[in-house]
Amino acid sequence: MAANYWESTQRKFWQFTKDELAAIRQRLDDEDPNLVQMFPLPQLRHLNIYFNQQINRLGKRLGVRQQAMATAQVYVKRFYTRTPIRQTNPYLVITTALYLACKMEECPQHIRLLTQEARSLWPSDLHGHDSTRVGECEFSLISEMQSQLIVHQPYRTLLSVQDDFSLTHEEMSLAWCIINDHYMTDLPLLHPPHIIALTAVLLALVLRPSGASQAGAGANPAGTGSAAGAATSAAAGGIAMAATALAQAQAQAQARAAAAGSGYGSQGSQPQQQFSQGGSQQQAEPSSQLAAEPKKATDPRLAKVQRFAGWLADSNIDIEAMVDCTQELISFYECHEQYNDKHTREQISRFIKARNLDK
């Protein structure tokens, strides 16, 4: 079960459409509209950015691997599709999610040490909490997630395609950062991990900075950097190139499907499943290489993007899902520029203290 995303509880129970996710959150708000009105919160994207930063701060203090921190972020997202945020202490939920994720990712942390670090990190919001409260919250998380704790991450797919697309260290570093960033969006609840990984590869190719790679990131489980800087500096040209590549891939796939007179372009078929589990479908490369050949001598980066687009066209990857992922990530980077950490922190602390959730 753990090795097969297509049979996993993640795909069966924790993948939603945007409309389904919006309806779930609206139902939670409708449970107590007075509470929602009394304690307004920042927009969801800003909350996600703040939670991501706090998990990373706590994880770095304890030397936690990136994959465990990523799993903790998914747990927080899942939990808050079942429980209204204003009825919880988010700092306790973050602490517990990281504790549980470390156990699931086989890098366990002692509950007392983790609680001590959390209280020193957020002294005014967790001063009345001890390891017993973390244990109680752990039971709540497991219960709300119905013991469905295995999370499939995009990092595995990214590493598996590095050689297939001849990705440089800088491209891998940027793609890794983009995967880190997607946990600050709803994408982990909307699309399969291999779609996220391939979108990260495409964006890394078109947004790749000309200078050194992003600080603090790397193609390894310790990289926790963000790609926001590269996305901002190269946004206009990169977005246009990514859109062109995806449109090209989609047009080629539709043309082949029409020529074959079959449902070649349908989603969710066996070839796509094989790729998501680590397969690379290298048979797609020759035609893609030929398509990109004329540009290689003058623009190596464009040639690599075209080769990637050709590979997509020859595969059964859901290109429409990649388009949606690309738009969501670009929109997130634009939103990130307006993020106000102090304002977000104050609004969270306000309802925590007013409702005595810090004791």
Image: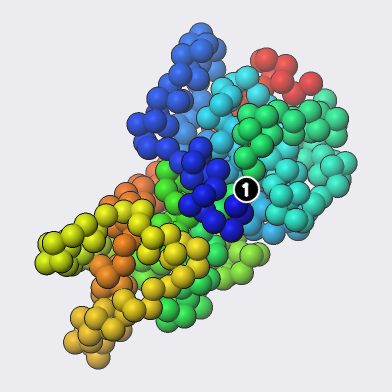
Classify 10 Å Cα crowding around label 1: few (below 14), some (14-19), many (20 and above): some
Name, please, the residue furthest toward the bottom.
297
Q: Residue at x 53, y 30 (%)?
A: 81
Q: Is residue 101 left or right of residue 179?
A: right
Against 34, residue 293 (above or below) is below
Residue drawn at x 65%, y 64% is: 222
Furthest residue in direction top, as rendered? 34
Residue 11 drawn at (x, y percent): 48, 45
The amino acid type found where label 1 is placed reads Ile
- Asked if 267 appears above or below 117 in the picture, the reply is below
Q: Quadrant of residue 311?
A: bottom left
Q: Which residue is mark 1?
A: 150
Q: Is residue 77 above or below residue 329?
A: above
Nearest the viewer among 199 and 298 is 199
Q: Is residue 100 visible?
A: yes
Q: Answer with the quarter of the image where residue 229 lies.
A: bottom left
Q: Quadrant of residue 131?
A: top right
**Toward the viewer: 192 or 217?**
192
Does residue 359 sit above or below 334 in this rendering? above
At which x and y percent is residue 239?
A: 28, 60
Going 33% across and 60% down the picture, which residue do you hit? 317
Question: Where's residue 80, x and y in %?
Answer: 56, 30
Provide the secondary structure element on which disc 1 rests: loop
Q: At 74% from the left edge and 30% from the top edge, which residue is drawn?
A: 139
Q: Is residue 158 left or right of residue 293?
A: right
Residue 205, percent from left and from top: 37, 71
Q: Could you tell whether 215 is left or right of 302 in the image? A: right
- Residue 208 horizontal side relative to residue 351, left or right: left
Say whether residue 52 is visible.
Answer: no
